[in-house]
Amino acid sequence: MDGVNGLRVVVTGSSRGIGRAAAVRLGALGARVVINGTQASALAETAAALEAVGAEYRMVTGSVAEPGTAQALIDSAVGAFGGVDAVVNNAGIVRDRTLLKMSVKEWDDVIAVHLRGAFLVTQAAARAMKESGGGHILQVVSNSGLAGGFGQANYAAAKAGMMGLLRTCVLELTRLNIRTNALWPIAETDMTQVVFDRASEAAAKAGAEAPSPASLGFGSTEAVAEGLAWLLSSHAAALNGQCLTFNGRKAALWSHPQECFEVFAEDPMDGEALTHWLGSTTPQPLARPKMVP
């Protein structure tokens, strides 16, 4: 794939999973990459993979929920490569628990890494991109943030928040030649292992063979990294404010939220008027995207 060679890219949460696969794929395509994670040993494995493909890279260890780490990521790219062309806000954790059982700490921990981290890195990157003439910020989101997720109130709220951040960035940063897009990657990772465990349990109870990740609509991290690299390439230069679903075999763009029914009145509406106009309106269906054909 062309259109990636020479890009200066920061990939948060790149010590494992999609982040590692994305960093390595980008490096193999000629991008210069700043990698990040909280575990030095795991991050070193990503570094070794980048060295194996001959990529130029820098490492910043730490949590993106900390302002110092977020700024260090951008400073590293600017100092080593002369600037930053793209940022991938991929860092994340899960603390799954049903809403009635979720602790405040489980809520705060997930919000901090996903949403606070995305804000901090986006802000630091946008400031640098403003000075250099533009760039691209990619928010890695999830179906949970787009359609909800059982046992994932914290994760869903964080990912939905990242979409709100994206849409605000489009309003504020487009004039600075900074684009913002999102990727919902459907990949087999440590964070999605719970899906396969549940499917295997259900299959065992039914006396059936456990389904493969591919049959459930999940691609490998390497396959999904190809879609991420494409989004950062010149081939996707026309996209701004978009969300791409990709699992290696399925690709789809999400629509922007919009009103589906509206009414205007000359005078302020009371309850009776609202009942008249909306009382018999058919509720909109809840979207549950298909993982497989």
Image (cartoon, helix red, strand yellow):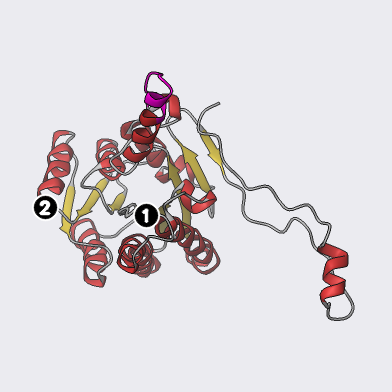
Q: Can you give x and y, in whole percent of width and height, for residue 230 in the image?
A: 42, 39
Q: Can you give x and y, in whole percent of width and height, for residue 268 in the image?
A: 83, 81
| Front position in the image: 137 or 61 | 61
Give the mark nearest the N terminus, 1 or 2: 2
Specify whether residue 283 is in view: yes
Amino acid type, callout 1: Arg
Residue bearing the label numbered 2: 40
Residue bearing the label numbered 1: 97
User: Based on the displayed image, in which of its 4 quarters is residue 38 positioned?
Assistant: bottom left
Mark 2: few, some, or many residues within 10 Å (few <14, many ≥20)? some
Q: Is residue 157 magenta?
A: no
State the residue at coordinates (22%, 53%): 34
User: Based on the displayed image, in which of its 4 quarters is residue 63 positioned?
Assistant: bottom left
Q: Secondary structure at mark 2?
A: helix
Q: Can you give x and y, in whole percent of width and height, for residue 95 in the image?
A: 32, 55
Specify whether residue 219 is in view: no
Q: In the displayed structure, does residue 208 sit left or right of residue 42?
A: right
Disc nearest the viewer among 1 and 2: 1
Residue found farthest to the bottom: 267
Q: Can you give x and y, in whole percent of width and height, for residue 18 in the image?
A: 31, 42
Amino acid type, callout 2: Ala
Mark 1: few, some, or many residues within 10 Å (few <14, many ≥20)? some
The overriding secondary structure of the stretch rendered in magenta is loop
| Distance in Å between CA atoms under marks 1 and 2 | 28 Å
Tell me: residue 138, above or below residue 288.
below
| Front position in the image: 1 or 107 | 107
- The range drawn in magenta is 202-212
